[in-house]
Image (cartoon, rainbow, N blue to C red):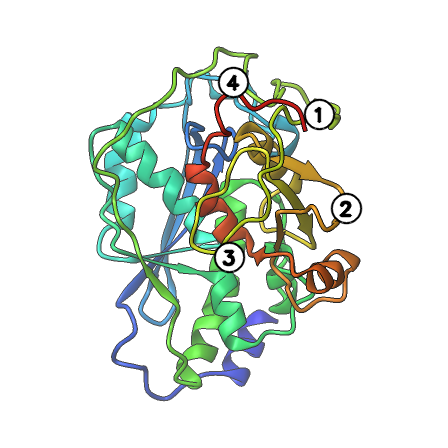
Amino acid sequence: MLEDRTTAASSPTSWPAAYPRGYAVVDVETTGLARDDRIISAAVYRLDARGEVEDHWYTLVNPERDPGPVWIHGLTSEVLEGAPLFTDIAGEFAARLADRVLVAHNAVFDWQMIAREYARARSEAPVRQRLCTIALSKELGLPLPNHKLESLAAHFGVVQQRAHHALDDARVLAEAFRPSLRAAAAGLVRLPLQECRPLTEWTDRPAPRIGQQPGGYRPTSWRPSRKRPACPYPNPGRYEDGKRLKQGMRVAFSGDTSVERDLLEDRAVEAGLHVATSLSRLTSLLVTNDPDSATSKVAKARQYGTPVVDEAAFGQLLRDVEPATEGASGR
C-alpha cells in the first residue's frame, strides 16, 4: 500500500523550516498548447505543509471555442456548452490557489495556461511560486523510465483511473507528490521552486469558431491524419543558446514527453518550424527530456553537435519565435 511505503521509506521526524506552508496540486485540460488556447477543465487538491490532503475541487470550463483534441480529454462541445466561463470560476479557483505553491507535472505549462486565463479576465492568479514534479523527481534521483505522470504514479504504487481527466490526474499527482515531498524532507533536499510572474499585458488572436481550431482539431473521437504540409520557410541553421527560435528551423523530438507528442509537434508547426522525423547535420534543435539516453537521435545529436533542450525550455522558446526573413521562400 502507498501509505505503508511512504511511512516506512521516508517519514522525517523534523520538517525543513524553509519548506512551503501549503501546496495546491493542479491539473488543467486545455484546447491545445498554443498561447491562445483555453482551459476546459481544472482540478485542485489542497495539501498542507507535509503533503496531507485538505480538500479537492473540480470544474468544467466553457472555452467558447472548439474543444480541441477530444480523443485525449474526452470533452466535447456538447459537454462544455453549459459549463461556466472562466470568469465565473476565477474567484473560486483563486481561493484554492491563494498562499500556496502551485504543484503540477510540467508546471510551466499549467502555470502559463492559468496566468493567461486570468490575464484575459483582467486579473491575476494569487500564485508566486510553482514546483514541477518532473524537476522534483530529478532532484530525488527517482529511477523512472520516462517523465510521464503514469510512470511517476507507478513508482509510488498509485493507480491511475482516468488519464487526462483533470480531477483524476490531480489526485494521482497529489498521491505521488506526498511521498516525493517526504523523501525530499528526509534528505534535506532543496525543493526546485520557480517564481510565477503574472501577465500584466495581454493580446489575443480572435478565437477560432467551433470546428475551426488550428491544426485540424475537431470535436470528434478519432485522431486526424498526422501528414502535414511542407514547411514554407528555408532552414536558417542551428539554434543558438540564449537566442530565439526562427521560423524554418528543423526540430526533432526524442523520448517521452509529459504532454502528448502530437500536440507539441502541432504547436511547433503552427509557429513555423519544420518537424523532422529523423536527425541529421541539418537539424537545428533536438528536444528531449532524456539527454543521456541511448536513442539514435540523442547519439546523432552528440555526433553532430546538435543543440539539445528539454520539453519545458522548448515550450518557453515557442512563446517567441522569430519570423522568417521577409521574402524568403522554399526550403
Q: Residues within 10 Å of mark 2 (few under 14, many from 20)?
A: some
The residue to which callout 3 is attached is: 173
Q: Verify CB contact (< 8 Å) between mark 3 and mark 1.
A: no
- Which is more N-terminal, label 4 or label 3? 4
Foreground mark, 3 or 4, reads 4
Foreground mark, 1 or 2, reads 2
- Which is more N-terminal, label 2 or label 3? 3
Expressed as whole percent of the image width and height from the top left, the position of residue 329 reads: 61, 22
Expressed as whole percent of the image width and height from the top left, the position of residue 158 reads: 60, 62
The residue to which callout 2 is attached is: 278
- Which is more N-terminal, label 2 or label 1? 1
Name the residue type under label 3.
Answer: Leu
The quarter of the image holding the N terminus is bottom right
The residue to which callout 1 is attached is: 228
246 sits left or right of 201 in the view: right
When asked about the image quadrant of residue 244, the answer is: top left
Q: CA distance from mark 3 to mark 2?
A: 33 Å
Q: How many marks?
A: 4
Q: Secondary structure at mark 1?
A: loop
Q: Secondary structure at mark 3?
A: helix
- Which is more N-terminal, label 1 or label 3? 3
Q: CA distance from mark 1 to mark 2?
A: 15 Å
The residue closer to the viewer here, 154 or 218, is 218
Image height of 153 relative to 203, above or below: below
The quarter of the image holding the C terminus is top right
The residue to which callout 4 is attached is: 66
